[in-house]
Image: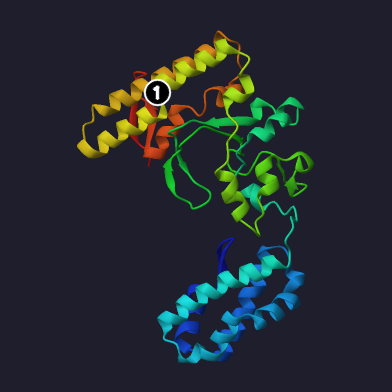
Amino acid sequence: MKQNSKHSIQLDAAELRQLFHSGKRKEFVAGVRLALRQILEKLHVEGHYDQVITLTKQDPCYRELTNTWEELKPAVRSQKWQELMERLVQIAYGTRPYCLRCGDCCHLGSPSLHPEDAELLSRGVLSTRQIYTLRRGEPVKFNLDGRLGALPSELLKLKQHQEKHHCIFYGKNQRGCTIYDHRPLQCRLQACWAPEGLEKLWQQAKLTRRHLIKEDQDLLEMLEVHDERCDPRKLDAAFARLHDTGDLAVLDEVLDLLRQDTAIRAFFTKNLNREDEELDFLLGRPLVEIVRAYGMKVEKDENGVYHLVPDQ
C-alpha cells in the first residue's frame, strides 16, 4: 500500500485496478482492512484497530458497499471507494479527538501569528529573529485548499527549516514541538481531527509588524517606504504583463525592483545595525527569492551584471 498524503491513503495502482475490476466482495472487505491499518498507522493509533473496524462495520456507507459491491461498475466502485476512504479517516479520528504531539502539523509548515500571540514575544518565548513577514500581494500557497494566489493581507509566520520546511520549533529528538506549552494560537486550535477550527481562524485578524513596533514611528515610516517602492504587487503586475505581451523589457522593471529591495536591505544592516536575521521580519522575504515563484531566478554574468533567467 502507498499513502499520497495525510488524508489520501490508498492501495497502490495495481491493487486498486484488481479491486475495482474483479468486483469480488471478499477482496473489497480485505482491501478495506488493509487500508484501515494504513490509516491508523498514519494517525499513530495502530492500537485502535479493533475499535475502528467495529465502528466501520456499523457505518451505513460501508454496509451498503458490502452488499452492493459486486453489482457496481468499475468506475462507480472507484468513486465509492474514495468516499469510503474519507469516511474511514473520519471514523479513525473520532477515536482520538486530542493532540498526540506527533509532529505531523509541524511538518506541514509553520503557523501564522495572531494578535493573541504578541504576548509570546513580550515574554521572550519568541523573538523577531524567529519570525518572517509575508507581505500583501506575495504569491503563496494557501494551506486550507492548496490554492496558489496573492496574499490578501500581511501575515507573520514562524520561520521554517530551510531544507525540510518544518517549523523551527519542531524538535527531532523530541519528535514534537519544543515550545508546546507556549505554542501560538494556530497550533492550539489546529486540530487535525477537526479542520473546521483552522478554517474559522483564517478569517480572524492576524498579527502584523505594526502591532509589534508601533512605538517606533521612524522605523514604521521606513518600512512603509520599502513597502511602497518594493511592493510585491508591482512584481506580480510586471510578470502578468510579460505573460500577456511577451515584452522582455518588463524584465528590466523587475530587476529595478530587485535592486531597490537589495539596496534598502543593505541600508538596514549597515546604517541601522540590524542583523540579517531581523530583515525577514522587518522587510519580508527578499524579492530575489519571490521571483522564483514566477519561474525566474537572478544570475550574475562574468561582468558582474545581474540578469533574470528561467529557473529550471
* Residue that label 1 marks: 258
Protein image colouring: rainbow
What residue is at 43 percent from the left and 81 percent from the top?
A: 76
Question: Residue 106 at x, y = what percent?
Answer: 65, 47
- Residue 24 visible in the snapshot: no
Question: Residue 203 at x, y = what percent?
Answer: 55, 43
Please name whichever residue, 301 or 42, is drawn nearer the observer in this view of the structure.
42
| Element class at badge 1 | helix
Question: Residue 191 at x, y = what percent?
Answer: 67, 54
Please name whichever residue, 18 or 82, is drawn nearer the observer in this view of the structure.
82
Q: Residues within 10 Å of mark 1 (few under 14, many from 20)?
A: many
What residue is at 61 percent from the left and 42 percent from the top?
A: 110
Q: Answer left or right for 102 relative to 230.
A: right
Q: Is residue 209 above or below residue 67?
A: above
Question: Residue 261 at x, y = what percent?
Answer: 44, 20
Q: Is residue 161 above or below residue 145?
A: above
Please name whichever residue, 182 or 238, is drawn nearer the observer in this view of the structure.
182
Q: Is residue 183 above or below residue 267?
A: below
| Amino acid type shown at disc 1 | Leu
What residue is at 58 percent from the left and 23 percent from the top?
A: 210
What residue is at 58 percent from the left and 29 percent from the top?
A: 208
Q: Quadrant of the N terminus?
A: bottom right
Q: Answer left or right for 221 relative to 90.
A: left
Q: Answer left or right for 190 relative to 302.
A: right
User: Please, which residue is most extreme toward the top here?
Assistant: 271
Q: How many circles with numbers are drawn on the protein? A: 1
